Image (tube, helix red, strand yellow):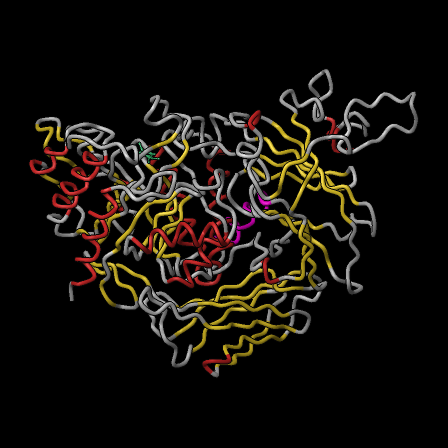
Amino acid sequence: MDPPNEHETPNNVKLRILALALLPLALARLEAAGSLINAYSRQSLSLNGKWNVIVDPYETGFYDYRYQPYDQGPDSTAAFFMDHRPADKSELVEYSFDRSPTLMVPGDWNSQAEKLFYYEGSVWYRRLFDIRASRPGNRLFVYFGAANYEADVYLNGKKLGRHVGGFTPFFFEITNAVKPVGNSLIVKVDNKRHREGVPTLNTDWWNYGGLTRDVMILEVPGTFITDYCVQLQKGSLDRVAGFVRLDGVRREQKGRVEIPELGTSVEFTTDSDGVARLDFALGKAQLWSPENPRLYDVAISCETDHVSERIGFRTIEVRGADILLNGRPIFLRGICLHEENPLRGGRARSAEDSRLLLGWARELNCNFLRLAHYPHNESMARIADEMGLLLWEEIPVYWTIQWDNPATLDNAKTQLGELIGRDRNRASVIFWSVANETPVSGPRTDFLRQLIGLARDLDPTRLVSSAMEVHADPSDARTLMVDDPLNEATDVTSFNEYIGWYVGQPDLCAQVKWVIKSPKPVLITEFGADALQGLHGDAAARFTEEFQEDLYRKNLQMLSKIPQLRGIAPWILVDFRSPKRTLPGIQDGWNRKGVIGENGTKKKAFFVLKQFYDGKTAMP
Ligand code: GCU
């Protein structure tokens, strides 16, 4: 079996990952193909900015009138990806990017054009660029931080490939497809929802479409470092376990990992697959933690390439009912977050957006965030590394996915592999979550077990879980059962509960009896209530700040009685857009469960939660 060629389409790289995972687990465990890791450290040409766009609800530029896809037939100038211009006035051409409006990239289209606010369909993006590799033999890749949901990518009229999944990076090699001047890069982005999709048809968040994250051309040497992992071995406070992978013709090379501040310099040799295993003593390092988010410059070099980045070293594990960070019990003072900047509107996408959102969480005295329900942009985890915030990262296996559809499972596995491939060196990331609020059934549990297995194969160092649900004891509605069979496979017992909002009134909290069979740490991954910021009234009046405040108080009292409670992440830090929330004058397209309003103003519940967390930090 050949080692994976990094730069095939993510799907068949995925199949190779699975094949690879069957290799001696100790070896295969650490590898994830299909990554172009640490892309932002590479020499690059940014393609951000204005792109000409054609909104194409009928996909006229993709299918002919017999609904046959142009990119599977003979060349046709009618296909928008040809970017064809009429040779003269007699030639019939019914589209023109040159004369089309523009949209900003990165950015969703919904918040940029009123007409596109609710739009779900295809939009064609075109960007012209000139480029020449700075050194003979260097290779060029076009890299996308993400595109929601399906992206068909063309360069100079030729198809580069297709990517499915709205929240993870993808790339294509263009070394032999570019010309020095006048390249036409065209991407058809389609955010239509699909029953068999991941996510599926029904979600409680806005389906922002477009080239939502950075696009850049990366230049790398002929043989380059395409992937690596430099993290502490599970359960060890001083041994690094990892790998380095090269891509290119010169796969067998000598290389070195250096951590100058620690005086660590370790040699490695890659094998015929271009892979080297790392296993070395870290040296006298300060371990990364929320109190001390110490990062180190780590440089990896081989004969043909060199990359570096800031990495923190910490361990995370479970022992009995405790979650141990660097071997010491920790309580996760958390909050949930969607990837949206409510002040500007639209998908959050930049380091500034991440600092704004993580800054609010810091004001709450959080040490933990659940990034819901899909991979957020890369800057979120990098800034969490700097700020000392722990993260739960999740793929959008949300509510009622098509469990028995192999293509849906493959899609979910691809998204999980791409997420882990991107963030595996982030100290802040402690959880991979494979799903949210999925109804218990055999096919569902099998589907999720496979994802959990894949996450463990790709990364044995982190915790794996899912946001599960609870149900009432049929004989007594006040007795709540936490008995999801999936819990056997997860590292913690993590579940959502909405006592006082979807289930009864807040007073019910005092009467609830929890039946939690698992001895594992309990992590509450959601609770909460809607409140319109500035709406005040009686605490029994829904949608008032007083109702939300009261519900928080009573939920925190109730949950604090659970002996295995080791963390909570209420729903949610800030109000977010949802097409499911229509109540006029209150919701108006917003889910109002934030403890901060869409205008950035804190609600009363914010201070209840902060006080609770201040109490936690005051404890020895
Ligand atoms: C669910 C779900 C969230 C949703 C929230 C709500 O639990 O996981 O995505 O927004 O509840 O109803 O507000």
Q: Nearer the viewer, residue 189 or 435?
A: 189
**Image quadrant in which you'd find residue 588:** top left
* The N terminus lies in quadrant: bottom right
Query: What residue appears at the point 26 percent right and 68 percent down from the top-left corner?
Result: 327
Q: Position of residue 152 (x, y in %)?
A: 65, 36
Q: Is residue 263 above or below residue 431?
A: below
Majority secondary structure of magenta residues: helix
Query: What residue appears at the point 21 percent right and 55 percent down from the top-left corner?
Result: 613
Q: Report the image quarter containing ligand 1.
A: top left
Q: Nearer the viewer, residue 29 or 581?
A: 581
Q: Position of residue 462 (x, y in %)?
A: 37, 57
Can the viewer see residue 393?
Answer: yes
Q: Is residue 146 above or below residue 405?
A: below
**Image quadrant in which you'd find residue 593:** top left
Question: Magenta stretch?
Answer: 10-22
Does the magenta-highlighted stretch encompass residue 20? yes
Q: Nearer the viewer, residue 104 or 499?
A: 104
Q: Is residue 590 above or below residue 375?
A: above
Q: Is residue 514 left or right of residue 572?
A: left
Q: Nearer the viewer, residue 540 or 207?
A: 540
